[in-house]
Image (cartoon, rainbow, N blue to C red):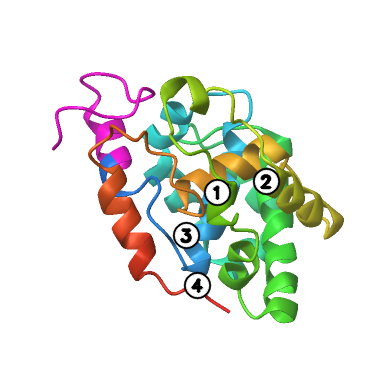
Amino acid sequence: MATDTCFWVPAGDDLYRAYHDAEWGFPVDDDTRLFEKLCLEGFQAGLSWRTILGKRENFRRAFAGFDLETVAAYGPDDVERLLGDAGIVRHRGKIEAAIHNAGRALELIATEGSLAAYVWSFEPAPGSRPARLTEAVLRTMAVTPESKALSQDLRKRGWKFVGPTTAYAFMQAMGLVNDHQHDCPVRGPAEAARAAFRVPG
């Protein structure tokens, strides 16, 4: 592991550090992973990502690995089961939103070909990004025009818990933007992964 990292990674937190070093900012084109992240970002609302990250395996178990067709078929009994699961965030609105959004994701895939092709169409142009990403710059970037556009379009399609801040956190995590600080050793590997990545279409 590198000795330096982005400002938001707590010192001594191995789980968070592993997430930062191996996942955050690396491009993803797998529909299941993209849907999982959209769900977990919704569950994060009002909480810390560290809380959600610590429960991620429990969420995967509870939501059948975030298989879209399985989750979309969940009914009232599943909602009650999930509300009784202490391993996840037991919030009725967020649970119901995840199930609802699975149905919307299937609709989107039917019209757009894949969830990946859809979300990557919101990738910002490279020239629109700040010339240098420092802690000070990143602290001002909770929302961008692209995250607003993604959020607005998802909500128009009926999705829930997908505000512009949630959409931007999703874009950061899934590699649609590389928000590793310029002095972070992981920035280079994330850039290389994006250069080798073929945008789905």
**Dots 1, 2 in contact, CB < 8 A:** yes
170 in the magenta segment: no
Residue 93, given in percent of the width and then of the height, sits at 74, 37
Magenta segment: 1-20
Q: Residue at x 47, y 30 (%)?
A: 49
Q: Secondary structure at mark 3?
A: helix
Q: Which residue in the protein does label 4 denote?
A: 199
Q: Earlier in the sequence, mark 1 or mark 2?
A: 2
Residue 144, given in percent of the width and then of the height, sits at 67, 40
How dense is the environment of label 1, judged by Cα within 10 Å: few (below 14), some, or many (20 and up)? many
Q: Which residue in the protein does label 1 denote?
A: 171
Location of the N terminus by quadrant is: top left
Mark 3 and mark 2: span between their CA atoms? 18 Å
Q: Earlier in the sequence, mark 4 or mark 1?
A: 1
The amino acid pointed to by label 4 is Val
**Dots 3, 2 in contact, CB < 8 A:** no
Residue 64, given in percent of the width and then of the height, sits at 49, 59
Q: Closest to the observer: 109 or 65?
A: 109
The amino acid pointed to by label 1 is Met
Q: Which residue in the protein does label 2 denote?
A: 147
Mark 4 and mark 2: span between their CA atoms? 18 Å
Q: Earlier in the sequence, mark 3 or mark 4?
A: 3
Residue 40 visible in this rendered orientation of the protein = no
Q: Residue at x 74, y 48 (%)?
A: 151
Mark 1 and mark 3: span between their CA atoms? 13 Å
Q: Which residue in the protein does label 3 denote?
A: 33
The amino acid pointed to by label 3 is Arg
Q: Closest to the observer: 96 or 109?
A: 109
Q: Earlier in the sequence, mark 1 or mark 3?
A: 3
